[in-house]
Amino acid sequence: MKLERIENGEDRKKADALVLPCWIDNKRIKLAVAIDQSLKGLINPFLDLNDFKAKEGEVVFLYRDKAKGEEQRILLLGLGDKTKLTTESLRCSYGALIKYCLPKKYATLNIAVPPTSDFNTIEGLRGVVEGLLLTNYLFTDLKGKSLDEHPASTVKEIRLIGVSSDELHLAKRLLTVAEGIYLARDLVNGNADTINPAYLSKVAQAIAKKHSTIELKILNKNEILKNNLHLLAAVSRGASVDPAFIVMKYKGNIKSKEHVILVGKGVTYDTGGLNLKPTGGIETMKCDMAGAATCLGLMQVVAELKLKVNFSVVIPATENAIDARSFKPGDVYSSYDGTTVEMTNSDAEGRLILADGLAYAVKNLKPTILMDIATLTGAIDIALGPEATGLMCSDDQLAKKLIESGNQTYERVWRMPLFAEYKDRLKSDIADIKSWNGRQGSSNVAATFLHHFVGDKIPWAHFDIASTAFLSEPRKYQPKYGTGVGIRLLINFLEGLKK
Ligand code: BES
Ligand code: ZN
Ligand code: ZN
């Protein structure tokens, strides 16, 4: 994907279509951009017909005479009421435009952007560009002949009309972020038999190879056992593929002691283990490495943008398979930090591998802020649905910042409680702690289990993305299936850390 700019009035390169935004201004439908007279003469009579209402995301198609300009196709794009424009409404409108274009296979678009004086410059432009880029994604790797019958392809070049060179610079940064999101989506959407722990390791290697600012360490099956990552080893027992424990360290600010660490759940397929998932619950479980995908996408973006932060990711990766060797519900294994865990349900595997990942980070990596991201519980989907990610946080200040980043990026998070009483639910008669104790409040109890391995000294946040990482229906500018959720929120958070 290429992003360029065209100054107002400048000759435009040929494109498959010209996009002209319109809004409702004082109850009248008006072009939201300044355009040349001949175009105005062409468009205005159509606007007067009043068929096109300029509603948010409404698209109308017009042809024009070749002699009259560079583009023969014109798309009028509705932005809704001028006074009600927000970053999010612009994401939705420009997202709807791309949705319209994908099946038409337009390769190049000249897209007019409303003058920045008409809405908050940077936030408005952010909405426009994010709407375009987040929607401009297709996953067609697993398509065969049907792709010939129903072709679709992404837009390859977008030229933004009327933006300054500084604004183009911001747009290009947003493209870098979007590319990290595409990577995360591809990893979630790929076959589980392909995207296994070894594949995640290869992706980590490729990112580290490109950036000397990243230090990479990968523990293999033997090293996982030797290093006492016994919970990860237990979950991997039933799998025919080896687990991996991936640690990537990015140093962007050697002067700072601040070190943000994100642990991502990398269950490349979750059958549930011996507590096998039923039909209706198992089919989407290739998505259970979405936390890991977010970590890898983030690492790529952070390194490409050369953020002035110290940021690491830790990815415990394994399949949770059913097999004669699978770990047995009721058995006790000890974790990386020596806590013995009664593993009461083999389908509660995410918290086990995260416990090892978190304890490893605490002991070896000196985090000043520790976070984890995981498709952890079905219950969070019942509580929040695809509208928000669950946030559990041990530190009010950190929670405030994350909620703020969530609101700004519209990757909204909703804080759930970590009541002290939840700890009682995790008391075990035969071990130090049990991993699961029934359905009540299960997202919060799962988070309480994770908290045990972090302790109270380090500010810690947990994102439960089971409701937001994988969509059964497309939403606004998000396509169906893998979303890459969390990347925009955490880039916003990392950029906001004081230097
Ligand atoms: N991977 C699942 C959680 C999940 C559910 C992710 C739906 C995405 C969509 C997790 O490992 C799991 O199985 N959780 C169980 C826990 C319980 C049954 C032991 C759950 O929340 O249902
Ligand atoms: Zn599970
Ligand atoms: Zn799982």
Image (cartoon, rainbow, N blue to C red):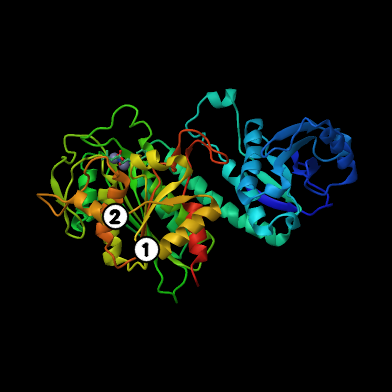
Residue ID at (54%, 24%)? 146
Crowd rating for badge 1 (residues with CA inside 10 Å; few <14, some 14–19, many 20+): some
Residue under label 2: 419
Crowd rating for badge 2 (residues with CA inside 10 Å; few <14, some 14–19, many 20+): few
* Residue 356 visible in rendering: no
Residue under label 1: 395
Frontmost residue, 222 versus 303: 303
Which of discs 2 and 1 lies nearer the camera? The answer is: 2
Q: Which mark is residue 168?
A: none
* Up/down of 226 relative to 288, above or below: below
Per the image, label 2 sits on a secondary structure element best described as loop
- Asked whether, in this view, residue 137 is left or right of residue 209, the answer is right
Amino acid at dot 1: Asp
Residue ID at (29%, 29%)? 278
| Image coords of residue 217 (percent x, y) | 33, 59
Q: Quadrant of residue 125?
A: bottom right
